[in-house]
Image: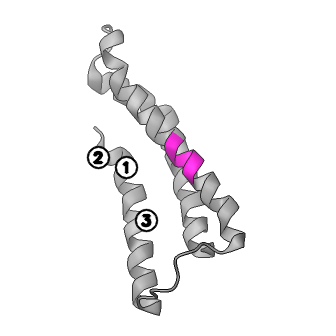
Amino acid sequence: MYLPTVMPTLSLIIGALVYDFRSTGPDPGATALPESARGLFWLVMALSVFYLALVAIAVLAQPFLPQLSPLELMQRSNLWLGPLQGLAVGVLAAFFRKG
């Protein structure tokens, strides 16, 4: 139940890091974010934390909703987790493209 909610985002991150490493090679001096990417970084961070909090709530709320099975609860939570995941991954892609 948890893996489908985080794998697309992790795949994007790993793909962007591999692409960046292959195209430029290791750069030991590049540790700071450019000024133009800092605002985008905080937006990505906020969306990611919000998304993961909603995933945790969907999983942890099940004992308090005995009328729903765990699978039914995850299917219902997919109504808001899916679009939010798309938004978070889109902003994350923009961050990796800009940074």
Q: Nearer the viewer, residue 28 or 96?
A: 28
Q: Residue at coordinates 50% horizontally, 86% vertically from top-left?
A: 29
Residue at numbered disc 3: 12
- Which image quadrant for residue 72? top left
Question: Residue 39, position in %: x, y?
Answer: 69, 60
Residue at numbered disc 2: 3
Residues under numbered marks 1 and 2 in contact, where contact means CB atoms less than 8 Å apart: yes
Q: Residue at coordinates 44% horizontally, 86% vertically from top-left?
A: 28
Q: In the displayed structure, would residue 47 be above or below residue 10?
A: above
Q: Tell me if residue 75 can be seen.
A: no
> Regarding mark 2 in the picture, which secondary structure is present there?
helix
Q: Amino acid at mark 3?
A: Leu
Q: Quadrant of the C terminus?
A: bottom right
Q: Amino acid at mark 2?
A: Leu
Q: Is 79 within the magenta?
A: no
- Which image quadrant for residue 69? top left
